[in-house]
Each structure stands twice: as C-alpha cells, then as structure tokens.
Amino acid sequence: MAVIAKLNNLRTAPRKVRLVADLIRRKDVNKALEDLAFVKNKTAQPMIKLLKSAIANAKNNFQLDADKLYIATIFVNEGNKLKRFHPVSRGRANEILKRTSHITLILDEKDKKTVAKKEEKVQDKKAVRKPAGEKKTAVKKTKK
C-alpha cells in the first residue's frame, strides 16, 4: 500500500531541494531520518517534517508498520515563481525570480518476497566472484 505525502510551495529552489532528495531516495525510513539529521542544507528540516508526516499517515490511516516502510519515490517539481525587480543603472530593472518547490514523497511497505530476492542476488554475486588469490597470468610474446 503506497502512502503519499506532499509539500507544496516550499520557498527554496527545486535544484537545491533535489540535492537532499537524492540522498534519501530508496532508503528505509529510519535510515533516511538519520541521514537527514546530519545534513546542513536548509531544506533538510522541511524534508524531515514531510517524512515524519508520511510515517504518521501510514500508521494512522493504513495501520502499516513503520519499520517496514521505505521511500519508494521522491520527486521535486517546480512551483510558482515570485517575480521581483531590482533597480540597476540607467533607470533599468532586472527581474529576480524567487523559486518555489513542490515535493512529493511516496512510502511503500517492504514485501518478504522482494527482500528475499535481493538477498539471493547478493549471494549470486558473491558466488560469481573469484577468490582474491587467483590472478590472471599474462603471456609474453617472444620475437623470433
């Protein structure tokens, strides 16, 4: 069951918000909260608030276990732009765009099947790797 939480009109440019969103994409909810706690970016605090809201929605509305939740999708869209003008020389005015962001966060619950598949893939990769002791030997060509 997917749980959706949105934050509209955050007064920060989307480019800056995407940097923080990329840090927590496809992570467990608890791990994402830990990571956001140590980010010095200004947008980390609203992101923490949004994530906690989504967790509360999952618990209250859908009776989901918070430990099984992960961030399935997070994306940042551009919101409205506040247009301001700054006076410059010779009686002109330059436009200043104060950008806003819309953040959409989708939480989903981990299935036992998907966790088992991931573990199988990891074990398969370990089996394919050669031991560290084996090295490729180079064959030298001799001139006649």
Image: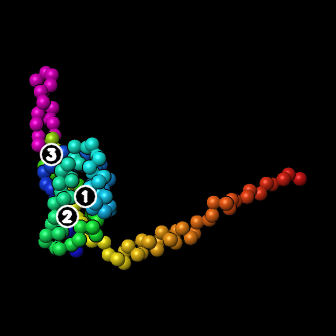
Q: Which residue is mark 1?
A: 75
Q: Residue at x 38, y 73 (%)?
A: 115
Q: Residue at x 16, y 73 (%)?
A: 62
Q: Is residue 83 magenta?
A: yes
Note whether 37 is above or below 129 in the view shown. above
Closest to the observer, 115 or 96: 115
Q: Residue at x 79, y 54 (%)?
A: 140
> Which segment did they paint magenta?
81-97
Q: Which residue is mark 3?
A: 11
Q: Are marks 1 and 3 in contact (CB under 8 Å)?
A: no
Callout 1: SS: strand
Q: Is residue 28 magenta?
A: no
Q: Which residue is mark 2?
A: 55
Measuring from the top left, give residue 6's x and y in whole percent: 16, 59
Note whether 87 is above or below 19 in the view shown. above
Callout 3: SS: loop
Closest to the observer, 68 or 139: 68
Total labels drawn: 3
Closest to the observer, 85 or 114: 114
Q: Is residue 111 left or right of residue 13?
A: right
Q: What's the CA distance linking mark 3 and mark 2?
A: 23 Å
Please state which of the two labelled residues, at mark 1 or mark 2, is closer to the viewer.
Answer: 2
**Most common SS among magenta residues:** strand
Q: Is residue 52 left or right of residue 70?
A: left
- Badge number at residue 13: none
Q: Earlier in the sequence, mark 3 or mark 2?
A: 3
Measuring from the top left, give residue 60's x and y in whole percent: 13, 70
